[in-house]
Amino acid sequence: MLVLLITALLTITVSSLTVEEEVQLEEKIKNAIWTPLVENTVAELARLDKSATPFNAHATCGFSVHKDLTDYETAKQLCENSTWIGFPTPGGRKLASIHTELENKIATLMFQWAYGGEDLEGTRYEGATNWAWIGLEKVNRTSFRPNDAGKLVWEEEDWLWTDGTTLDSDSYENWMTREETDEQVQPDMWNVEEDHQTAARIFRKIREGETSGVWDDTFKSKLHPFICKFNIPVHYIVFPELKKWHEAKADCERRGFYFAKIRNKAENDLLVEAINRVYDGVRHDKKFHHENWIWIGATDLKASGDFEFYDGEPIKFSIPWAKNQHDNKKTRKQGSQDYAAVSRWGEWDDSYGNDWNRPYACQCNPHGVAIDREMEEANAAWEREVLRRNELKDRLKKEKETKKNMKKEARQAKKKARQERKQKKKELRQKKKEEKRKRKQEKAAKKASRKAQKKDAKEAKKAKKAEKKKENAAKKDAKANLKEAKADKKAAKKDAKEDKKEAKKEAKAAKKEAKADKKAVKKEAKANKKAGKKGAPADAEKAGVSDHKIEGETPQWTPIDDALEVSESVEKRSEGSVKEDWLAGSGSPPWTPGE
């Protein structure tokens, strides 16, 4: 973040700024560099100091301050031959070369820390511990001081750093200046007899208002502490010793480093470089062999599956997880896989940090490496590649899902078709069964119908027979009735004849009686007439004759003429019906009732 801020500030075109804006920009740069450094570095050195205490030295990544008082050449030898740091430094170890204001500030703060603060030993030039050797020496025109030189003897090209870098007009330098005028007064190449001041040293005291320890040239024979620099070509340091995750973190801190953080693909590649420097690119055949994986400072202890660095800093780049990782497996004995390790080829894995022993990686700068354009391009390319892979993965997933859905749909269609066929077969079976049942019913119905028909026929035959029998009986009855009717007719005729005969007889008797009555009437009338003439009516009752001429009374005999009509009527009626009508309660008897 610091490097990016400085880079952003420096990218502003200076020629486009006013003098006031340039001053403000310089102030922003100083604040961006020194304010956080002063606040944080001293506190960090308190911890980092532990790593070098047995060697009378104070170290952080890249620099170490050694309190042994030595001359310049001995200090050079001690830095180059030092083995105490405990890890390989392929780029070499030399008396410190300082190329930036930041490096000068770190070296000065470490120097102050090694001696407990800013308090000096005596006056400025009096105490040997007030100065420390740095790896800058005069290599040209070292045997004489120019006669016309004033206070300052300064030609950049005459000076060379121990890492082989020469000074030029663009190089960083921090030679001592006058406090009143800010005029550069060192190096002055002071000489004592044949010896000249040709080696640079750094001042432990930081003057008020200044940002770093100033430099001075002095005699190489002087005895001072010295500052070494480790020219490590990679940001990470890999230790092949096998430790558990928490042990690895503690060991990084004990050595004066930070447990490794990987914030982008470029840093991931730098870690792989550091791993290859230790293992020369060799790896175990078994992929998940413990020595193939190096512990780093990432964990998901706070939120399962969400990895962050051990101090809570989030991981913001696309992690290159190994295939099917992270899987967060859990066992009763080992717990869950909550700790990250990076393979020798750069893939990540989640592992059992409390149980597995593995190599581990530390880093120098807690804030990460400065990202140059090449790294930015590599990071962008990686994120694009991840995006492409994710899109491809999503597309393949969608295609797989589509294919799966198509297969599922095909299976469902096949299943549906099978079910439909099964249903059709079932329906066909049911239809056949129904038809069979229907045919059976029809057959049964036909059978029943035939049986019923047969029964009906039998019944009909029986009924017919009964009817015939009935008809025969009826005929017989009719015949009998006819015979009887004939008999009755004959009897009736006979009766009629008898009746007629009787009627005639009765008529004759009636006629005779009527005649007798008439005769009696006439006799009576004659007697009445005779009596009338005498004045005394004859007593009819005494005479034994009823007067039928009395008004309102009905005579008690049938006139002879009416009896004859009755007789004739009887003869005219059919022989068989006269008696039947009379027996049925209608018609007149076949005779005329008498008196």
Image: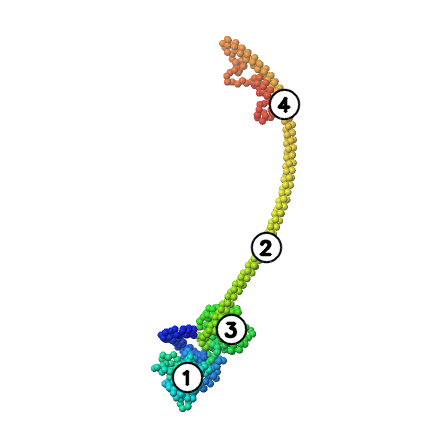
Residue bearing the label numbered 2: 421
Front of the two marks 1 and 2: 1
Indicate whether 313 appears above or below 448.
Answer: below
* Residue drawn at point x = 55 percent, y = 60 percent: 406
Front of the two marks 1 and 4: 1
Residue bearing the label numbered 1: 155
Give yes or no for contact between labels 3 and 2 (Cβ–Cβ under 8 Å).
no
Residue 430 as seen in the image, left or right of residue 310: right
Position in image of residue 408 (x %, y %)? 55, 60
Residue bearing the label numbered 4: 493
Residue 247 or residue 45, whichever sits in front: 45
- Mark 3 residue element: loop
Residue 428 or residue 512, whichever sits in front: 428
- The tag earlier along the polypeptide, 3 or 1, is 1
Distance between mark 1 and mark 4 Cα atoms: 193 Å
Distance between mark 4 and mark 3 Cα atoms: 150 Å
- The tag earlier along the polypeptide, 4 or 3, is 3
- Mark 1 residue element: loop
Distance between mark 3 and mark 2 Cα atoms: 57 Å
**Residue at the outermost left position:** 180
Residue 166 as seen in the image, left or right of residue 455: left
- Give the residue type at disc 3: Gly
Give yes or no for contact between labels 3 and 1 (Cβ–Cβ under 8 Å).
no
Residue bearing the label numbered 3: 346
